[in-house]
Image (cartoon, grey):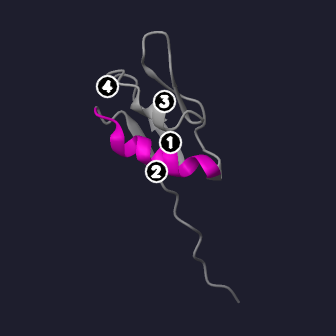
């Protein structure tokens, strides 16, 4: 998983920082800051929720495809 945030479209609602404080914070102007581009396993559910809750769409969460190469 990788997370990013578009600070240009952030409206400073703060839902990301409240929902996933280990992944997101806000600067002095209330604009999103990403603390962990690749969140730890335990922070991933909250990061996903933050992406869904962001009212401006500034928070983006991308799930990385698992390696499904054949074994053998």
Q: Residue at x 50, y 42 (%)?
A: 3
Q: Are marks 2 and 1 in contact (CB under 8 Å)?
A: yes
Helix, strand or loop at label 4? It is loop
Mark 2 or mark 3: name the one nearer the start of the chain: 3
Q: CA distance from mark 3 to mark 1?
A: 13 Å
Q: Which residue is mark 4?
A: 9
- 19 displayed left or right of 57: right
Q: Which residue is mark 2?
A: 62
The quadrant of the rendering that contains the C terminus is bottom right
Q: CA distance from mark 2 to mark 1?
A: 6 Å
Q: CA distance from mark 4 to mark 2?
A: 18 Å
Q: Residue furthest left?
A: 56
Helix, strand or loop at label 2? It is strand
Relative depth, front residue between 36 and 18: 18
The label number, if any, that marks residue 3 in the structure image: 1
What range of the chain is rendered magenta?
42-55
Mark 1 or mark 4: name the one nearer the start of the chain: 1
- The x and y percentages for residue 35 are 59, 30
Q: Is residue 60 above or below residue 45?
A: above
């Amino acid at each position: 998983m990788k997370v990013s945030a578009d600070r240009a479209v952030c409206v400073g609602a703060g839902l990301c920082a409240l929902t996933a404080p280990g992944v997101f914070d806000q600067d002095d102007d209330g604009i999103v800051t990403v603390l962990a581009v690749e969140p730890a396993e335990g922070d991933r559910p909250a990061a996903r929720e933050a992406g869904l809750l962001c009212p401006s769409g500034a928070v983006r969460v991308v799930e990385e495809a698992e390696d499904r190469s054949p074994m053998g």
